[in-house]
Image (spheres, rainbow, N blue to C red):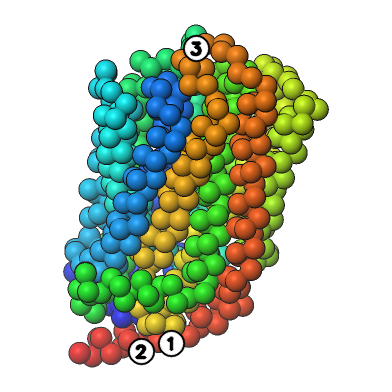
Amino acid sequence: MAVAENFVEAPDIAAPPHEQSELKPPIGVKLVYAFGQAIESGYLVVAGFVFFYYTAVLGLSGSAVGVALGISMCLDAVMDPLIGSISDNLRTRLGRRLPLMLIGAPLTGLALWMLFSPPLGLQPLLLFGWLVMSKMSLRGVASLYNLPYAALGAEMASGYTERASVAAYRGFFGVAISLVMVILAYSVFFAGQGGLQVRAHYPMFGRGMGLLLFVCGAICLVGVWRFAKRLPQPATPAAPLLSGLPRELSEVFRNSSFRALFASALLFWMLAGINGALNNHAYIFVWKLQPQQIQFVSMSFYISIMVGVPFARLVIARVEKRTACMLGLGVVMASLTVIHGLRALGVIAPTGDVAMWMLIANVGIAGFGLAFPVVAYPAMMADAADEHEMLFGARREGLYFAGLGFAAKAASGLGQVAAGFALDALHFPKAAGMTVNAVVPEHVLRLLILAWGPFAALFGVGSVVALAWYGVSRRRHAEIAARLRVSRAVELSAARTT
């Protein structure tokens, strides 16, 4: 059985066994494939450091940083669907995905280094320009790796449950590498007096993180290339890039399941963008945490996701992916409202070690809930791509995951834009970030907490509501898979006789 309609075996090498009713990659392939998740997860981890660095350390206004991030986000609107379409239509001996990933991995490491290494003495306007250009570069080259990588994961497995397994491997390793990055950040790069508020720490941080992401991306490429290039290749000619893309995008957005996932992911990442951008501001100025204490809080978050990912995998094997995702989002929203609301009202005001233990418990709950959308979103998007093939007769994994990737990056960027304007609106003092143990007025801290938690959680409500329109249930996917097996067999037979 071929894994996609209009696909035939690559002529120069044996394809995976088509007699199987379901394509399942070996465990070893799933393990090395998971390393590639480091580039997307690492990109998201450094986002909060970027916001704090350029506002609190380098002194750009929150609105200026927000606008810079918003401008860089516009690149995604053009680049992500373009990269997705190129990935879908590429024809090489290594398949459709690997060549773009080979280019994206080293460039991502280089762009990350540039982002944290602006030249000394830049005036605000030039610093603003450096942030725009370096962030745009990082977004573009990270997409060059991430989008083909995600589409490859959808091609590697065909079953409803097996796709959740591939997504679980991805999610678990993505969280693991995020945890490693956090430990390195607070124990190595930002350790000591001043921590995050010392400018000289950031260039080395950018170099170290860039090298780490490149190494993980390279491990993925070396580990999966034999399996990936054996996947059946498209028999139909590639669509013209510029003329074909509008038609392809139109088809994708005509699928209601894609629209529901896109809207849900967009709103969820708005939540994550706002909360993540203000994390370090809240930890340092509200809860009075030192770098080592922030590390423990962050470790609790990522470890709880790692614990939650296999649990989410088991739950998804028994309930609908949409249901599991909604439950997880509900847990995340609860964790952003209770403690934050009490602090904003002045009912509690712990600092230091007391605040650290309270936050460790709270972010642990949030991380466990987050594990469910971490597994469910990519698995649901792969199922929606199957539905697209049934509806329109063509595979569009690249564009589907371009939509998911764009939703994540664009919404995260919008969240950072909103966080930047929020800092200016609540009159957060610029000099506070450049002064160790600076005192910020209490009313400003209360507004900061509201923006950091309950305001961000509002976007989670919309994310849950949007999922109501996602239509690929377990039963629906079984029907789709049965119809695709028949149509693929017909196509494969026709291709072999011509």
The residue where tag 2 is placed is 490
Q: Amino acid at mark 3?
A: Thr
Q: Residue at x 52, y 72 (%)?
A: 257
* Total tally of numbered discs in the picture: 3
The residue where tag 1 is placed is 486
**Tags 2 and 1 in contact by the CB under 8 Å rule?**
yes
Image quadrant in which the C terminus is located? bottom left
Q: Secondary structure at mark 3?
A: loop
Q: In this rendering, is residue 408 above or below 137?
A: below
Instruction: Check residue 435 in the rendering and tell me which mark sits there, or answer none.
Output: 3
Q: Residue at x 57, y 47 (%)?
A: 271
Image quadrant in which the N terminus is located? bottom left
- Position in image of residue 286 (x %, y %): 64, 23
Residues 97 and 65: in front is 65
The crowd level at tag 1 (other Cα within 10 Å; few <14, some 14-19, many 20+) is few
Query: Is tag 3's residue or tag 1's residue first in the polypeptide sequence?
Result: 3
Q: Secondary structure at mark 2?
A: helix
The span from disc 2 to disc 1 (Cα, nearest Å) is 6 Å
**Tags 3 and 1 in contact by the CB under 8 Å rule?**
no
Q: Amino acid at mark 1?
A: Val
Q: Nearer the viewer, mark 3 or mark 1?
A: 3
Query: Is tag 3's residue or tag 2's residue first in the polypeptide sequence?
Result: 3
Q: In this rendering, is residue 409 above or below 90?
A: above
- Position in image of residue 15 (x %, y %): 30, 69
